[in-house]
Amino acid sequence: MAKKKSAGHHRWRWKLGFSFAACILFLFVLKLRQNSLIGAHEATVPESELISLQAPDAVPNKIAFLFLARNRMPLDIIWGPFFQEARADLFTIYIHSRPGFVYDKRTTACSYFYGRQLSNSIQVEWGEASMIEAERLLLIEALKDSSNDRFLLLSDSCVPLYNFSFVYNYIMSTPKSFLDSFTDVKESRYNPKMAPIILKNKWRKGSQWFALKRDHAAVVASDAVVFPIFRKFCKRRPLLDSWRQKHLTGDPSKQHNCIPDEHYVQTLLATR
Ligand SMILES: *[C@@H]1O[C@H](CO)[C@@H](O)[C@H](O)[C@H]1NC(C)=O
């Protein structure tokens, strides 16, 4: 599934992962890298009520657009026309925003966002475990609709680079999830205390943004084993601290900076 990459390549992927504005493009770049797609055979389906049966044939499969937003959607004028030309029965929208933030005509120009915020959203610290929790809340909500077949995680800075029919056909045409996943070359981010639940050879890194198939989405939403380990042992060090460590001590063995949302889904699916 994942291969060790050269340091240069690794850096390139890292930057790409942070390129919020291009996360849709990012999904398309992955198309060129078949080895980073996660196949159906690589994760098993847990016994969980979250997995519902296949949608009846009469109901078309939908893409669930899951937005991890703070409050206002800065690019709503682009999303409006995008959803406007879409068949209404081919998509659903879910937004995790700051608790209490409401999408209506006062706060967004895109009517498709009206009332789509989760009612149980939490306060998210960027790059902390609470980010993973927000992703899981989105997945749990979207899985309740049995016609949602693909689960696309987006930030509030994402823009669609193609029209809806293109995106829909593209995502539906592959039986795999789109998830950037590779062996983490910087092993110091792995904490040995994570064993035996997460073994070192299952430790993965990738971009936070994904398009998951329904069975993979259910694995993430129902996980009660790997997430607690992340919460406990995968912590982001304060930025200043991190800089000091790197530039003043230069001791790589002391660098223990773990960004949960760039490891969680990849590592979880690798442990299955
Ligand atoms: C959507 O985009 C594709 C590829 O750019 C194009 O071939 C197609 O005609 C477009 N469809 C619509 C409905 O605009």
Image (cartoon, rainbow, N blue to C red):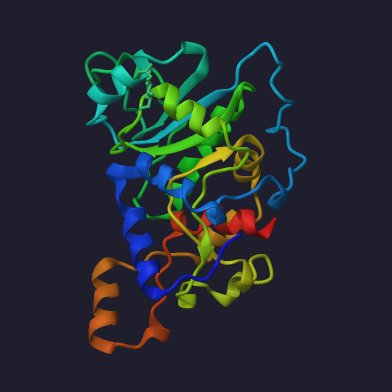
Q: Where is residue 221 in the image (x, y as percent from the top left)?
A: 60, 41
Above or below: residue 94 compared with residue 234: above
Q: Quadrant of residue 7?
A: bottom left
Tell me: 217 left or right of 64: right
Tell me: 142 left or right of 78: right
Instruction: Report ligand 1 position as a quadrant.
Output: top left
Q: Where is residue 196 in the image (x, y as percent from the top left)?
A: 69, 70
Above or below: residue 117 compared with residue 191: above
22 or 245: nearer the eye? 22
Q: Position of residue 261 (x, y in %)?
A: 45, 54
Above or below: residue 24 compared with residue 11: above
- Please, which residue is most extreme toward the right here? 47
Q: What residue appears at the point 65 percent right and 72 percent down from the top-left corner?
A: 195
Q: What residue appears at the point 52 percent right and 63 percent down from the top-left corner?
A: 182
Q: Where is residue 12 in the image (x, y as percent from the top left)?
A: 34, 63
Which image quadrant: the N terminus?
A: bottom right
Which image quadrant: the C terminus?
A: bottom right
Q: Quadrant of residue 139?
A: top right
